[in-house]
């Protein structure tokens, strides 16, 4: 939900991944979504003149950086953590099976 983290994906992390891991599959992960319900956290973000990152904004960024998926998780509550790990592992296994015909790698941005 942190706008600064959100901005750094486009400005720093995605360009670095594309430079160092050109053929990687990207999964964008929105973390700490439980904080959207914490009024004091939302107030702190609002004081900076920004708003918390929404699901819609996350999906839009995932499309912009050509991520294969966007998943929101909360490690505090456990929301979607298992499904994220399962999906990443399945994708990694699929890619390892395809490795004989492709050199494509996988990258997860959290």
Image (spheres, rainbow, N blue to C red):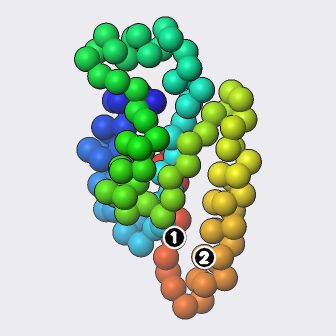
Left/right placement of residue 17 relative to residue 48 reads: right
- The residue identified by callout 2 is 95
Residue 22's tag is none
The residue that disc 1 covers is 105
Q: List x then y, in percent, for residue 44.
A: 39, 11
- Against 103, residue 93 (above or below) is above
Q: For residue 18, what is the image quadrant?
A: bottom left
Marks 1 and 2 sit apart, C-alpha to C-alpha, by: 7 Å
Q: Are marks 1 and 2 in contact (CB under 8 Å)?
A: yes
Secondary element under disc 1, as helix, strand or loop, is: loop
Q: Toward the viewer: 20 or 2?
A: 2
Residue located at (59% from left, 89% from top): 100
- Left or right, residue 64 beside residue 69: left
Which of the marked residues, 1 or 2, is nearer the chain's N terminus? 2
The one of 41 and 92 positioned closer to us in this rendering: 41
Nearer to me, 106 or 43: 43
Q: Position of residue 50 (x, y in %)?
A: 29, 22
What residue is at 50 percent from the left and 81 percent from the top? 103
């Amino acid at each position: 939900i942190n706008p600064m983290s959100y901005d750094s994906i486009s400005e720093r992390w995605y360009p670095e991944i594309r430079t160092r891991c050109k053929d990687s599959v990207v999964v964008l992960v929105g973390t700490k979504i439980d904080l959207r319900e914490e009024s004091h956290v939302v107030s702190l973000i609002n004081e900076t003149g920004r708003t918390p990152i929404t699901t819609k904004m996350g999906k839009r960024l995932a499309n912009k950086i050509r991520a294969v998926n966007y998943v929101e998780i909360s490690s505090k509550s456990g929301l979607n953590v298992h499904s994220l790990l399962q999906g990443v592992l399945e994708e990694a296994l699929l890619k390892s099976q395809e490795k004989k015909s492709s050199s494509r790698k996988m990258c997860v941005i959290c």
